[in-house]
Amino acid sequence: MHIDLDAFFASVEILDDPSLRGKPVCVGGAAQRGVIASASYEARRHGVRSAMPSVVARRLCPDLIILPGRFERYEEYSQRFHQVVNDLTPDYEPLGLDEVFIDLRSLRRLGIRPVGAARSLRERIRDELHLECGVGLARNKLFAKLASKESKPRVVEGKLLGGDGVLWVSPQIERAWLSELPVRALWGVGPQIAAKLHQLGIRWVRDLARVQEATLARHLGSALASTLVAFAQGEDERVVTSQRELKSLGHDETFAESLTTIDQVEAMCRHHAGVVARALRAHGLVARTLSVVVKFDDLETLSRAQTLSFGVDDEAALSAVAQALVRSVDLGRPVRLLGLYATSFLERTRNQVQLSFDVESGGDQRQRALELSRERQVSAAALRDALDDIRHRYGSSAVGVAADLDSQGLHVERQRGSHAFGPDGPAR
DNA sequence: TCTGGGGTCCTAGGACCC
DNA sequence: TCTGGGGTCCTAGGACCC
């Protein structure tokens, strides 16, 4: 079973503010560089779609209401959604906040029928969360997801047509249904792959079903070729995995106005380091690999990564590495996006050496690691935990790093040759 | 019309080890 | 002295998903 909540972010906004009901509502970035993350059906009637630049959406629908998004709120709804699913079975796999795959095999022994389970889940989601959803039932993930999409309401020529909300694709009709779909409908076929397939004369799934895997592999690589060939035959071996391990975690931001100075870029490194460090600690993880991504105004993107011999989860360490990485890039052009990502996780408790970083003042060489004494480690960790607690209770902007004050227009006197993270640990 | 922010997976090359 | 083949780890880039 695949369940997909309808227009999730936009629907939550409408629930929290009923005056929005019936209006074209979106969640996304309203600024010049914003895109639409979620669109109400009223907005979709005007042609607005998620992933569309907000500028375009406004042109299509001048009355469009674009809301900034409250992800903690969506998270709450998502958890309630998962709780409803969990009441049926723990064998489910979330996909983002608003979708789940459910393995129904263990329910068969209990005499629970798929269609009945689907209808009662839909009922509970409607009664308890006041949200609508589409449900797909099939032999595998491929068809279940295609079916849930098909079960939803959709806009045809500006009119909203209702879906049944539940669609079961029986094995007898699978192949015939699949062959009529465009390749773009398949999981893993986005704009780039679709364009490549079109160049090869492959537009429909039935075309894909006739092509040699080796031919496809030369153009798409072996992994994608083999999954697409399988999908085209209606075969999908992917299982429902309920316990997935987090593999990476990061934060990036596209700026309304591109950054033009190294000071601005380094200040953003410190900011991102704080966000990522707190996320790591919230998960009880330390990261060995940190990478920085820079996107320029022409959308050219480049990345730099560094793997350490130990894991880190504190702002000072992340900040030092991020700034060292960003300094190794030839900036010289306005920076549209800056991202910081952490990978190669270890559980915090298994990390052998907890180190802190000190930045070489004025130097452009890579950072060096300094081990803190046990006592200083303990007090630094206590301070950090206290700050996490304050942020949790009063919001992430409640406490800041003194070094960032000047980047926000407040002047801070800094002595030449000294720096924020001195030998006595983080200065806050 | 011009492209976000949270993630996942794959590819390819180079360094290194046995 | 110059060399193969299997494997791991790391880096950089690209595409996809929601």
Image (spheres, coloured by chain):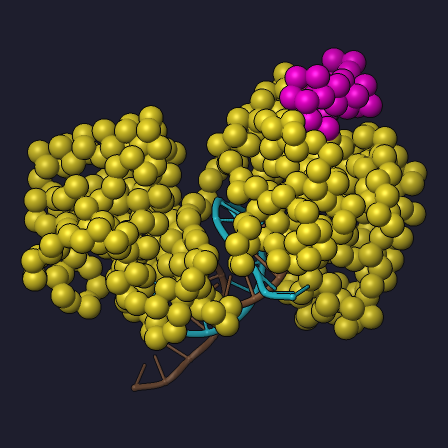
Chain colours: A yellow, B cyan, C brown
> What residue span does the magenta drawing correspond to?
A104-132
- Relative depth, front residue between A364 and B18: A364
Q: Is residue A324 left or right of residue A428?
A: right
Q: Is residue A44 visible?
A: yes
Q: Is residue A125 left or right of residue A278?
A: right
> Residue A281: x, y in percent?
33, 35
Q: Is residue A250 left or right of residue A204?
A: left
The quadrant the C terminus of chain A occupies is top left
In the figure, A251 relative to A263: above or below? above
> Residue A222: x, y in percent?
65, 62
Residue sitting at x 52%, y 30% = A73
Residue sitting at x 60%, y 32% = A13
Is residue A114 found inside the magenta-colored segment of the image?
A: yes
The quadrant the N terminus of chain A occupies is top right
- Relative depth, front residue between A76 and A4: A76
In the figure, A408 relative to A101: above or below? below
- Relative depth, front residue between A81 and A368: A81
Total number of numbered labels? 0
Task: Write down the quadrant of residue A415 in the picture.
Answer: bottom left
- Relative depth, front residue between A376 and A232: A376
